[in-house]
Image: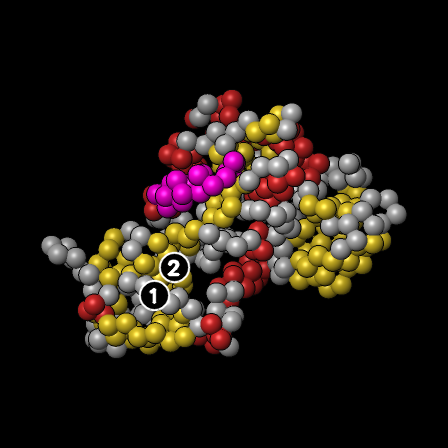
Amino acid sequence: MSYHWVHLVKGPAVVTLEGFGEVLGKDVSNNQVSVGVGKILPFEIGSGCKIDIKGGKSRLVSSYDFGTAIWHQIIRRIFLENMITVRTILIVGDTDTGKSTLATYITNEALKKGYRPGIIDADIGQGDLAPPNAIGAAVVTEQITDLRGVNTHFYEFVGNINPVGFEDLIIKAVKRILAKITTACDICIINTDGYILNTGIEYKLKMAKEIRSDMLICLGKASLLNNFKSKLDSSYVVFGRSPSKTTKSRIDRSKRRLSQFQRYFKEQSRTKVIAKELSYTKFVYRGQTYSGMWIDRNGFSRLNKSKTLPVKLRRPEGMFVGLGMNREIVGFGLILNASSHELTIQSSANDFNKIHLSNSGICKKTVLG
């Protein structure tokens, strides 16, 4: 169905429809939809449909610049005569070019056609399937309007919210998750961060080659597309338009990142304080495993492997950490206190034998209240 106008709604908001409507390919007719903080959703409604928007901000815009019409050609190429033509799709582009929105739309279209889509969210700073510092992945079984409504099945912990300097770690993490998820899905969509400046393009090129993606969708400027086409097989590099003027402010980004942290601590009844002895716990930082940690006289964390110089990290109090059991991430936590012999961590994880350290610190009151 084609639409001439789109209601663009920025959250937090609640939208109620009386009549036919869609959001990113999902039927939301005669329904109520919540739009998360900092999230922007396009509501495409049929003639005669009544729409009530409470909270947030909204505007009526042309479907030529917004909504799913700008990506119809991409969908036709992926699902040629309703048959999947590619198995692995990598989406790249600058910040605010619609990468998560397109990933959601492709996911909904796959479900509509009877396929099982998987999605990997490799944006370690503004991801939807994992907290900042981590990568998440899931097999999606129901249509969605926001990826944050999906139950994540697999995690990898990177330990930073900026990909610069962590590019190889991210690529290795994506490859590990891809190997797990592809056995359970028909098509896999990989969403990435907005790092494309300086060495960012080389990083995305390396990721495309390492994961052997069947299609690379480049959102944003044509110059970026040409850059990728000149260095890859141009037949599988596809250009996608970006929704016009949908940039998020720095405040929007901070609020959305904070809300993603808070999701993992909001149910106080499920979290508990756990004590771990430093000398009997393994620690992981930047992909390296260390047999122990100690706190120096200035309160900083230090790690050491045999025959290597100690690694110095930030103060442990307030550090956001990943919690692992063998090779799997089983939860996340917040270091509350550190002494010369033990750490106390707030977490809902029941059992873990590795602590994955990060460069991120969070105020306890901000996430725990």
Q: Residue at x 66, y 42 (%)?
A: 243
Magenta region, residue range = 172-194
Q: Is residue 126 left or right of residue 327?
A: right
Tell me the crowding category of disc 1: few under 14, some 14 to 19, or many 20 or more residues within 10 angstroms, Cα based: few
Mark 1, residue position: 351
**Is residue 361 magenta-colored?**
no
Q: Amino acid at mark 2?
A: Val
Q: Quick one: SS at disc 2?
A: strand
Q: Is residue 221 visible?
A: yes
Q: Quick one: SS at disc 1?
A: loop
351 or 222: which is nearer to us?
351
Q: Residue at x 50, y 39 (%)?
A: 185
First along the sequence among labels 1 and 2: 2
Marks 1 and 2 sit apart, C-alpha to C-alpha, by 8 Å
Counting from the top left corner in percent of width and height, residue 362 is at 43, 69
Q: Quadrant of the N terminus?
A: top right
Q: Amino acid at mark 1?
A: Asp
Asked where in the image residue 5 lies, by quadrant, the reply is top right
Mark 2, residue position: 330
